[in-house]
Amino acid sequence: MKNLRIDKNIAYNVLEFKKYQDRQTQIIIKSLLIYFSYSHQIDLFGYGVLDPHDFAKKMKIDKDSLFKKHPDPKQVKDTPLGAKKLYERQEVEGCFSTARVWDSYLENALYVLNTFPLYENFKGSTLDGKYIGIKNFILIREVQLHFKKTNKGRNTKIFYKYKLDEAFERNLRKFFLQTDFQKYLQFKKNNTEDFYLTVCNIYQTYRLKQINKYYWKFEDLLLLFNISSDLEAKYQKRKLNTIFKKFTGELSVQIKGLQFGWEKGKGQRWAYVPFVTWDQVDMSIVKYDDNKVLDDVFKKDLRRNLLEVFFNQNNRRDALGFLNWLLDNKVDHQLKVATYVSTYSMNKKVYKGAKPGTMAKQFFIKLASCQNEKEVREYF
DNA sequence: ACTGATCGCCTGTAGGCTAA
DNA sequence: TTAGCCTACAGGCGATCAGT
């Protein structure tokens, strides 16, 4: 799993996540969003299933810390009933009822994600004046807790299902940031994953504009790395330098010529304005990379949409059935072409100038000529 | 077989000191 | 101020053992 596409909002708003209670909760929330993006990308049969054990393993989180009881769950804080009544109800009705208190670290994180929107400030102007505003966006719409008895009724296995917000899902398709999942996990170990996302975001956004330098505010970086504001400035700078050093070492392959440095601000005695630069990238390479990624996105999108159609026609979701259905051009041909065309139109920015209907027909003819699953995978 | 608890090792980090 | 070196300490992780 090399390339992971995530919603750019996550990178633009890394500092926003700091408002979510404690560090552990922030880690879980961010990991959930990454995990959702990851699942959305790879899982053809993805219904938004969250198995806590798999989640912990993939995201390298200690599973005990997920099930541990949160000292100050948001649901308890929010209730007008008071904590005592809330827990009494759970006691009476059982924890597998609507009276359940979502008070483990994981469930609290899910609760927070579902009830606590991110905000974005914006400004604009009209003919006769200016305005500023705040808008919110939420990332998941719905969370369900599923439970079933296992081990002859002795244990209860739980897992969750979630529904992503439409806008979030759309962003995963169109407005995304490319990251390296392994690198993300690696930086998470040192609590520098936020900065990793930020750097990726800056690089990918600015290189398109042919800009190869970006300045930060010193204070913002301190906040990002949880560096105490009481510390003497030179020590703060030293900490930042050790982090910079690590990043240049780790990312020299991905970002050619990556370098961090300091400049003097206006009238400052010492250099305290941090910046990052990288080698200017040839635009033709950028375009080629982008097209490759977008083509990949389109195909995944198409696969997902075709699967929906297959499900609606046959009311089952088995992989083999789907494959056979795909390869047989006699079945639902019109539907398949229509699906191709509608998926295409959602991605049309990339493919403008071509005729989707013709492309669709050619696509399915070539698909039908595949001999086995391996060939299908290579082509599609 | 599966789960939970504990222990100790290892790694990464903070912070002090010094030389340049 | 910066860079390098050193030490003390905390948190993460795997190994091991005990209980169901």
Image: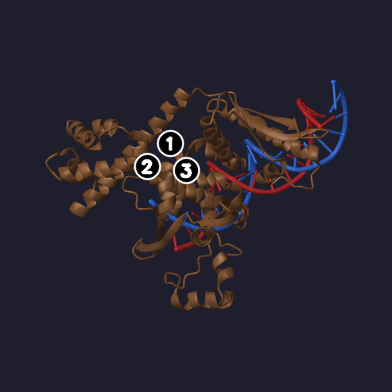
Chain colours: A brown, B blue, C red
Q: In this view, does A2 lie to the left or right of A153?
A: right
Q: Do the residues marked 2 and 3 share a common chain?
A: yes
Q: Could you tell me residue A192's position as x and y percent?
A: 61, 41
Label number found at residue A42: 2
- Residue A200 visible in the snapshot: yes
Q: Which residue lies furthest to the front in this view?
A: A128
Q: In this view, does B6 lie to the left or right of A41?
A: right
Question: Looking at the image, which residue is at 38% across and 63% down?
Answer: A147
* Tag in front: 2 or 3: 3
- Residue A54 visible in the snapshot: no
Q: Residue furthest left?
A: A330
Contact check, label 1 and label 2, Cβ < 8 Å: yes
Q: Could you tell me residue A17's position as x and y percent?
A: 58, 52
Contact check, label 1 and label 3, Cβ < 8 Å: no
Question: Looking at the image, which residue is at 67% across and 38% down?
Answer: A216
* Tag in front: 1 or 3: 3
Looking at the rendered structure, the kind of residue marked 2 is Ile
> What chain letter is assigned to the residue under label 3?
A
Q: Name the residue under label 3.
A: A6
Looking at the rendered structure, the kind of residue marked 3 is Ile
The residue nearer to you, when weighing C3 against A199, is A199
Q: Could you tell me residue A106's position as x and y percent?
A: 51, 57
The span from disc 1 to disc 2 (Cα, nearest Å) is 9 Å
Looking at the rendered structure, the kind of residue marked 1 is Met
Q: Earlier in the sequence, mark 1 or mark 2?
A: 1
